[in-house]
Image (cartoon, rainbow, N blue to C red):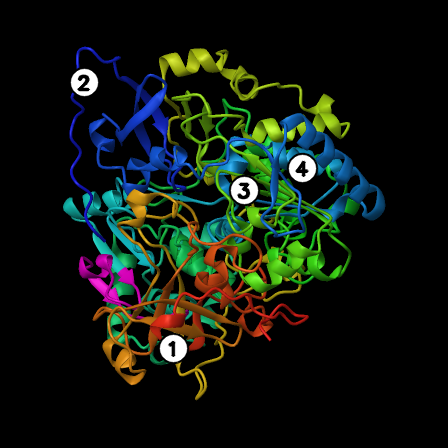
Amino acid sequence: MTEVPAENELAVDALESPVVDKHMICASCDIACPVVAKVRDGRVIRIRSSYKPSLRENICVKGIYAHKGFENPARITHPLKRVGERGSGKWQQVTWEDALDDIAQRLTRVVDRYGPEALAVATSEWNTSVDNGAGRRFMNLLGSPNWISGVALCAGNTAAINRMVYGWFPNPDFGKTDCIVLFGHNPKKHSWTPVYNKIRKAQARGAKLIVMDPRRSENAELADVWLPLRAGTDAAMAFGWLNVIIEEELYDRAFVDTWTVGFDALKQRAAEYPLERVAAITGVDAQLIRQAARMYAQAKSAIIPWTPITDQQLNSTSAIRLQCTLRALTGNIDVPGGELLQGFNPDIVSQSELELHESLSDTQKAKQLGADTHPAFTYRGMAALGEPTARVWGREYANLMTGCYMANPLATFKAMADGVPYPVKAFISLGNNTMMGLANLQTIYRAMMNQDLIVVHEHVKTPTAQLADYILPGDSWLERPLMYEAFGWTATVAVTDKAIEPPGECRSVYTFWHDLAARMGLGASFPWATLEDVYDYRLRKLGVSFREFVATRQFHAPAPQYRKYETTGFATPSGKVELYSSVLESLNFDPLPYYREAPGSSASFPLMLFMGVRDDPFFQTGQRHIPELRRLCPEPKTYLHADDARSAGIEEGEWIELETASGKVRARAEIRDDMPRGLVRIPHGWWLPESQEGKENLSGAWVFSDAMVTSDDEAYMDREQGIPHLKGLPCRILKVDKASATKLVVPQLNRTGAGA
């Protein structure tokens, strides 16, 4: 990617209005970097990094150019109502009041006919965070358990599985650690920027870095040990490490004896994966695996930071549990330099508390879609953790990363499309481009086309918005006050004021829920008229208002305390780290981790596909309407090895078509020597905002979105979570002639949602 020019201070003409600095929390991705917005005459003219020396490097191109996206002519600034058939692209500008009146009437009709569970809502971490629990509060009071999010594939599922092992989602202590292990994660200067900087600083003071990645990534180049494992074999690799640690007695015996359950059973399971077998599965030399395991276990302190790679695999649940197990066996839980269990901030009303999960009846919770077959992060999966969570952390519900009480996305879309096990007929999508943000665009399209009501709260006409009945204009992170608590993960709370006023009639997602609740007879449960009113309520334990807080400080966090489990125990049914999971056993799943091989390549599909690459200038499916970012990455690219390109007759820069059993996607070929033979990587989230809208084209999503090639087959599903395998699907590549390379054609869909 082209390097961004170094920042230069603004030269302010004496005759011009002064430039005012506004300290903000950037929401261009989900890392939440403190930045400074420079404002003149009510406009943001520049975004730069924080003045604080320790944070000055924490900014990326997405943050630098964020204001360009919010000023873009494509931005929606007034409510739009569909006037043609769904997906026709015909809209009429209406008032918020008229839109909400009609939405409330239509939603009431759906609820009266089908029940409250007929409403499904999809959102993102940020929109859930800035609504201060209002969305879940609305749904829980109405009676719908069917909330879904992209966090089912990214951090939310990790949080839920971590809770099954030791009762919270731990936060790595980069500042004190002696060893960092990256399971496929590859933070870079313009992607997960603060994590990239923390890793580099830790290495500079002597910390070791171990990287597992099929390709020779940027972090692999800088690692002390690089394990080039086969894509999707994270769980097997972790078993190899466990064997070394157990056989060589490198584990913390005192911690294991006192604070874990199931060690003997785990030891027997790990023995099924000797190094020779792990080497054969992963493709990594056994002695290199042993070297890495020793380096990790013998470090004074070590961390395994969260990774989106492990979230998106056939063995996601087991691999996440095995990472938890490695932390526990080496005594790296809730210690300096290890993984910290922070809990709720005791001085702040948490978002989990505001969500009112206790208001949703057990009858309605039991209707949560997917809970019967894939319950891990549903109410059913979390139920056994309620009492332990209250015992240790003071509240029964801990919705960490907003991912602990979700419906299963695939089950939700199938209910929307086919009415099984019951109809879902109203759908609200909040700033997450649901069509492309979750797996299998074909199934989601059928689901959308079968709705009585679709409401989208957005900035631009995404492919999802193009199928809506109403597009409601959302505010941006520069245009609203914020109280940020890291999605419930950490005890640190940050506050910022808005930098500028939102344009036109753009409103916050909180305002949407507040005003809709009033029309649905739930207004008494939403007594706070504005976001600032909510913040005043949440800060009341500190005895300060939001205005007073903003004026005097930017962050609030309790002093760190370590080994809290020695006083409280762990927030699990046993009160200990559950290496043998009583929760999964009660749900009729294997209580021990395991490895399950995904279907391999074949003569028809000789290559393997690694999905989920995010191009540095973009976060998820966003920002592709910003010219400054598109110049850095104008088109989607597929990464492949020269030998694979040569076999397919493909040259650098040519358009190719990648096909799986589920569908096809197109991109330009980028031949790279850091890619292993036989593995192809495609980018996530591509569409072309500048191209034709409407259901036939979806602005290029039918052709360029990686959601076209994901699989709904149970053979490629994690059993406990029901999320798809994105790190090793059989595929093939074909050269595309230039004339038809970007032709947009909607596929003919069969009953199951796959391309006919």
Q: Contact, CB < 8 Å: mark 2 with mark 3?
A: no
Q: Which mark, by number, is residue 357?
A: 4
Three-letter code, disc 1? Ile
Upstream in the sequence, badge 1 or badge 2? 2
Upstream in the sequence, badge 1 or badge 4? 4
* Direction from residue 749 to residue 316 in the image, left or right: left
For the record, the magenta segment spans 211-233
Upstream in the sequence, badge 4 or badge 3? 4
Q: Label 2 neighbourhood size at 10 Å, few (<14), some (14-19), many (20+)?
A: few
Secondary structure, magenta segment, majority class: loop
Spatial separation of the CA atoms under disc 2 and disc 4: 51 Å
Q: Contact, CB < 8 Å: mark 1 with mark 4?
A: no
Question: Helix, strand or loop at disc 2?
Answer: loop
Q: Label 4 neighbourhood size at 10 Å, few (<14), some (14-19), many (20+)?
A: many
Q: Is residue 343 magenta?
A: no
Q: Which mark, by number, is residue 733?
A: 1
Q: Residue at x 48, y 75 (%)?
A: 660
Please say if 149 is above or below 318: above
**Residue mark closest to the camera, 2 vs 4:** 2
**Residue mark closest to the camera, 1 vs 2:** 2
Please count the marks in the image. Answer: 4
Question: Helix, strand or loop at disc 4?
Answer: helix
Residue 588 appears anywhere in the view:
yes
Q: In terms of depth relative to the viewer, which is nearer, 425 or 234?
A: 425
Q: Position of residue 340 (x, y in %)?
A: 39, 41
Q: Give the labeled residue for mark 2.
A: 12
Q: Give the labeled residue for mark 3.
A: 402
Please say if 355 is above or below 204: above
Three-letter code, disc 4? His
Q: Position of residue 573 (x, y in %)?
A: 61, 48
Identify the image quadrant of residue 329.
Answer: bottom left
